[in-house]
Image: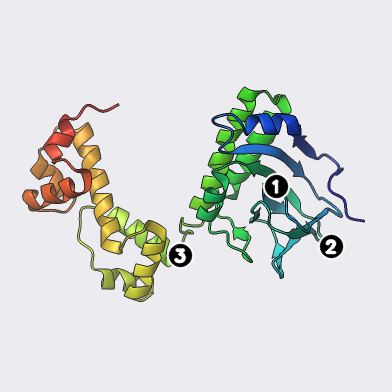
Amino acid sequence: MERADGFDHQRLEVVPRPLVEAALARGVTRRILVTDAGYFPRADHHGRHRIAGAPETIVIVCVGGSGWLESDGVLTRVGPGGAVVIPGGTPHSYGASEADPWTIWWAHVRGTDVAELVEASGIRPGNLVLSLRSIDRITSLLDEIVTSLERDMTPARLVATSGMAWRLLTQLAVDRLLPEDGTPLERAMRYLQERVDGHVQVAELAALVGISPSHLAALFRQATGGGVLAHHLSLKMARARRLLDTTDLTVAEIARQVGMDDPFYFSRQFRKIHGASPTAYRDTRKG
């Protein structure tokens, strides 16, 4: 017999639906609102079947054991480090495995901004499961949400949990773009970071990390939106900004510290990115 809740040592918070409707009519919480959240340890016989989907988007993070998700005719196993993200209105079924029931953190969210945030995480029909790299950070956010709702469900508390939910969904989106340690992309990015004051050839970098130049370029486009050299330039400009803000070095000296011997070329690149010369940037009041 499958069950929706009632597990030993569970944590479960459900915002009363009149409070949900009122919050969805207010400024901040209409954009993103946590309606339910919880923690189910070793959720034996846990399962839900929603043939018409749910009005909320559902986020489930598995931290132990295993479970499964079925949606759009696709059955997917979910193990530790897996996150299920089911957009509102999507028919689905999910549940814990019989042999080793999952332990999960979960939340339901509604609001006008939720669909766009879910899309940013790479969720698509038939592909509703993510493999997480920063699972501790994500489960910490879910713990914060549950703990906050356990205190009270005042309008102020719902605003607070809205902020946590925003961070949760943006972290899911960022998580898939950050390279795992030891992968060719991570090694290439680290190499560029360590050589901000130098010059890099794409073909040489690709050979160093063991992939083709075209594959490396594709990985960078996916992760950063630009190419290898564009990313290297952005790292150089980030260091230049720090030096302009925190030192009295001349523009020529800063140019050399980011691997550009020609200060005029450095200034042109800086202006192209920042819309101001290095000197004008330094003179701008900040903070």
Residue 50 % position (x, y):
78, 55
Image-based side of 60 in relation to 209, left or right: right
What whole-number distance in Å separates the C-alpha atoms at marks 2 and 1? Answer: 31 Å
Which residue is the extreme one toward the right? Answer: 1
User: On the rendered image, what quadrant is the N terminus found in?
Assistant: bottom right
Q: Say if residue 194 shows up in the picture.
A: yes
| 2 or 1: tag closer to the N-terminus | 1
Query: Which residue is at 59% across, 59% downward?
Result: 131
Which corner quadrant of the image does residue 94 belong to?
Answer: bottom right
Kindly report which numbered mark, 3 or 1, lies closer to the viewer in this rendering. Answer: 1
Q: Does residue 255 lie above or below 156 as drawn?
A: below
What whole-number distance in Å separates the C-alpha atoms at marks 3 and 1? Answer: 38 Å
Kindly report which numbered mark, 2 or 1, lies closer to the viewer in this rendering. Answer: 1
Q: Which one is in front, 25 or 245?
A: 25
What whole-number distance in Å separates the C-alpha atoms at marks 2 and 3? Answer: 33 Å
Say what amino acid the circle numbered 2 marks: Ala
According to the picture, the residue beneath numbered tag 2 turns out to be 99
Say what amino acid the circle numbered 3 marks: Thr
Q: Say if residue 66 shows up in the picture.
A: no
According to the picture, the residue beneath numbered tag 1 turns out to be 55
Instruction: Rate crowding at label 3 as few (under 14), some (14 to 19) or many (20 or more) other CA atoms within 10 Å.
Output: few
Secondary-structure class at tag 3 = loop
Residue 114 % position (x, y):
57, 46
Instruction: Rate crowding at label 2 as few (under 14), some (14 to 19) or many (20 or more) other CA atoms within 10 Å.
Output: few
According to the picture, the residue beneath numbered tag 3 turns out to be 183
Query: Which residue is at 30% across, 57% downward?
Result: 231
